[in-house]
Image (cartoon, helix red, strand yellow):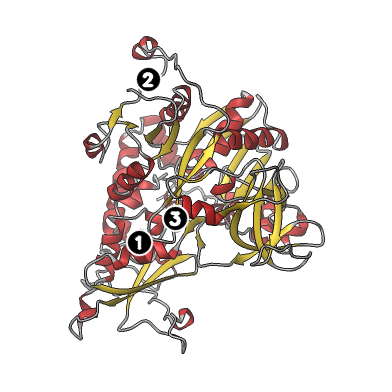
Amino acid sequence: AGVRGGDTVGIRLPRGRAAITALLATWRAGAAYLPLDPDHPRPRLEFMIADTGVRVVVADPAAEGAEWLAEGVAVVAPVVVGGPAARDLVCDPAWQAGPGDPAYVIHTSGSTGTPKGVVVPHRALAARIAWMRADYGITAADEVLQFASLSFDTHAEEVFPALTAGATLTVAGPGATLPDHLAAGAGDGLTVLDLPTPYWHQLADDLDAVDWPSGLRLLILGADQVQPTAVAAWRARFGDTVRLVNSYGPTETTIIATTAELGRADAVHRPPIGGPVGSTTLTVCDAAGRLMPYGAAGELLVGGAGVTLGYGGRPGATARAFVPDPYGPPGARRYRTGDLVRWRADGQLEFLGRIDDQVKVRGFRVEPGEVEAALLALEGVGGAAVIVREQALVAYVVAAAGSAPDAARELSPAGLRAALAARLPAHLVPNSVVVLDALPLTPNGKLDRRALPAPDRRPDLGGGYVAPRTDAEELVAEVWAEVLGLDRVGAADDFFDLGGHSLLATRVVARIRAATDLTVPLRTLFVHRTAEAFALAVEDLLLAEIEALTDEDAGRLLAAESAPRRNGTTTA
């Protein structure tokens, strides 16, 4: 396709073997790769492609939403590895990537309203891979699950240490949850899992509901603060048989910068983020860049081999975030994380919060300014503020100046969320939108975030309440109400308009599985968003299983009809 050394190739493929092959093929051609999540809206992907200068995208031309790719870039369809077409291909690149050349580009949320592409060089990734293989003890005897989306740099922690060690890499299917994957029997040989901390917290609520691999020896956590109660539950279930590692690191420092071994003491006290990995250097400084003493809070600056090349095409933003490193060799830089930390007496770092407005929502890094800018770009919106409440984004909007006195009533929360969903990835779309006559201000004229009202537990979604009409709808409504903390859910209600999000969706499918022994793909809830539509989808899945039963299967089910289940229910 004409890819040359120094190019960046877009990879728009769902999680799977083809995607992993595309990453390696891109490197083989001397280029870097840019992950393009198939679930992200078109404007977001178009911006990332233009921002990175991508001319070639590896994608399935027949996939949903792929038709627009041909408008500005060449589309390369994935080739079946080992198939006749693959044997005809010859790869003899004239240019090989060097240690300082880009390996991949990952876009992060931007405070100015547009995402920033972090350019990660091969030398930084190679340093991380070498450390992970040694510290995590990855060998050819291991089986590692590839679970993260390629849009997040955690995928590199799963993929490349395993492949370079000769370990088995098991790729979870598109949209599959961890309980789904393990329940299918495909993960019994897994020895290493790498999970987002908020996702693990959800699983820790009921560890016995997950068919954990019998040979699991290492669980790596990351992306958010670990809760002691979850550590306590894990230790009560597994004791010391599974190594539990808490990792921390912004994308700008290549996946991780610190790790901490979580033991029994962390089941009582706030778990730390640990100490430096490999040759990483950590300094805690005040606003003027002066070192802070042990126990004092300050901003964390990260130096060493993992520091990336900066933000592609943004020299100003790069210069502000990547500053000279007085403790490193000539030309070395440190990354200003914006994270507030302190050194503990035991020599480990404790995370305290942020020095700016950036937040973590369910493990996702979010700049409220990016969401606010998207809201202000919508017709009729004159002011916007975005905050986090109970691990969910909440947006507050006011009508544009000069509008009619009752203009605020014309701003529909559901309509505003739909408009944002067409522009932003799902994790940046607020779970609730509150329309106000005016944003509350402090005496200084600044936004008074503490005065912003809490959203209604059951927002007015329009159309009135429609009671569940079938057994399936009643089951779904009951599960949704429990998970969302609502008194009631109607058949026409939208799960995400009620405040649902990806982590709560995981709890929904787990509850449905416990009640029916039916494995419902997580994506089903994202496609069938109302209680009525989701109940119909669940019924269709049940009918499909019934139609697939043999006479012998049916006989076994009838014989076990009244047998008690693990959760105390019986087979219907």
> What residue is rendered at 41% in x and 56% in y?
427
- Write the residue at 67% across / 50% down: 325
Task: Decide: few, some or many residues near mark 1? Use Cα within 10 Å; few <14, some 14-19, many ≥20.
Answer: many
- Which amino acid, by three-letter code, is at mark 2? Val
Front-most of residues 30 and 202: 30
- Nearest to N terminus: mark 2 or mark 3: 2
Is disc 1 placed on a helix, strand or loop? loop
Say which quarter of the image contains residue 80.
Answer: top left
Q: Secondary structure at mark 2?
A: loop
Which of 168/480 is in front? 168
Residue annotated with mark 3: 109
Residue 188 visible, this orientation: no
Q: Residues within 10 Å of mark 2 (few under 14, many from 20)?
A: few
Q: What is the spatial separation of the Cα atoms under label 1 and label 2, in whole angstroms?
A: 37 Å
Q: How many neighbours does mark 3 have within 10 angstroms: few (below 14), some (14-19), or many (20 or more)? A: many
Q: Which residue is mark 2?
A: 80
Q: Position of residue 198 (x, y in %)?
A: 55, 56
Q: Which residue is mark 1?
A: 496
Mark toward the viewer: 2 or 3: 3
What is the three-letter code of the residue carrying label 1? Answer: Phe
Q: Position of residue 268 (x, y in %)?
A: 74, 63
For the residues labelled 1 and 3, the Cα–Cα distance comes to: 21 Å
Q: Position of residue 234 (x, y in %)?
A: 67, 52
